[in-house]
Amino acid sequence: LVETNNAGKSLDWSFSITQPEANFLMSLETMACTRCGDGFEPHEKIVNSHGEVWHQACFVCCQCFRPFPDGIFYEFEGRKYCEHDFHVLFAPCCGKCGEFIIGRVIKAMNNNWHPNCFRCEICQMTLADQGFIKNAGRALCHECNAKEKAAAIGKYICYKCHGIVDDLPLKFRGEPYHPYHFNCTTCGVELTSEAREVKGDLYCLRCHDKMGIPICGACRRPIEERVVTALGKNWHVEHFVCAKCEKPFLGHRHYEKKGLAYCETHYHQLFGNLCYICNNVIAGDVFTALNKAWCVHHFACSVCDQKMSQKTKFFEVDLKPVCKRCYEKFPSELKKRLKKAYDTSSKTIAWQPCS
């Protein structure tokens, strides 16, 4: 990475001053314009630039032969240029924005850059004062290069020292670390990857167990907020899921079988019918209606709780069975809406003998 500077230079204007006439005339006789070689008239305005003197009309851009705007010029190989011509002829263009670079130039990756344009291609941090590493044709900062290298070999990068974590990392505030960077908040022992984070502090397993904080049965991390207790364990709400579809229950009913939890759909698919009322597997004959199953002695009107048999006619209201007597007591307006929304024809209970 190489830096150059092509900033412009300003003019020094000098004028003849009152001296004894003999000395002044002798001085003018020895002075000549750098460009045209002619001498100067008494009291003529003279341009002095780095020890060289010029007629004011002769001090112009060597390319366009015009005076320098605001007295600013650029010098290259002994020749002076106005800002516009110097840019066109010599000034480098930035590899990112394409603009001319005035002042500090960063030369890297076979190109020229403004200091603020030369950035890491991943995190966009400026690299002019930080240094960079070339990675697959990209300019990367040291941290991003380490992450790319670790990702290629399936390793974590320590968030503190940016080194590769060869063993299991310690996860703290969502970032991976070498465990030896931390000590237990209580006893001060150097931590391992099994350390526990509680309210922003880290603890070894022994000190954490003394605090009595429940551990999630899925992720083995402490549970600091809502706890789900099931299957003899504690769980984060989002980690208590169906063993089949792995969707969290989020407070909905679950069914347990051989130490595992299942949602209603997959429990039925795997283990048979569950009674809609008692939530137990139906061992004997099964009533099926409204896409649900009931024990024989649990199928009843949802309004009056009168038991119904396989010959009883009923109506479906909000996906629940209602006997004819209770249905007739409903307001006429409600019955009209129900008739419009549902098929109010009598439904016969399907009788399924026990296999």
Image (cartoon, helix red, strand yellow):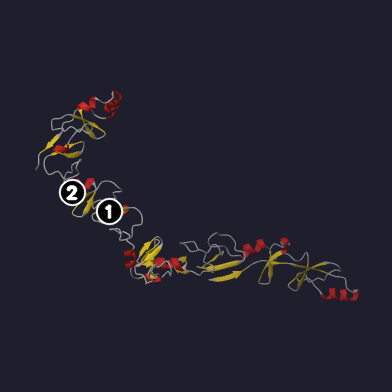
Residue 196 place in picture, x, y as percent: 35, 64
**Horizontal relation, residue 212 to residue 24: left or right:** left
Task: Decide which of tag 2 and tag 1 comes sooner along the chain.
Answer: 1
Residue 329 shows up from this direction: yes
Question: Considering only vertical position in the picture, is 322 above or below 275?
Answer: above
Count of picture labels: 2
Q: Which mark is residue 204?
A: none
Judged by depth in the image, the label closer to the viewer, 2 or 1, is: 1
Report the residue at 17% width, 29% height from top.
313
SS for tag 1? Answer: strand
Q: Residues within 10 Å of mark 2 (few under 14, many from 20)?
A: few
Q: Which mark is residue 229?
A: 1
Report the residue at 28% width, 29% height from top.
341
Q: Amino acid at mark 2?
A: Leu
Report the residue at 27% width, 28% height from top.
338
The residue most toward the top is 332
**Horizontal relation, residue 254 to residue 47: left or right:** left
Q: Quadrant of the C terminus?
A: top left
Q: Are marks 2 and 1 in contact (CB under 8 Å)?
A: no
**Which residue is labeled 2 in the image?**
270
Which image quadrant is residue 343 in?
A: top left
Front-lying residue, 289 or 56: 289
Residue 181 place in picture, x, y as percent: 40, 70
**Horizontal relation, residue 5 to residue 156: left or right:** right
Q: What is the spatial separation of the Cα atoms under label 2 and label 1, in whole angstroms? A: 24 Å
Q: Amino acid at mark 1?
A: Thr
Q: Residues within 10 Å of mark 1 (few under 14, many from 20)?
A: some
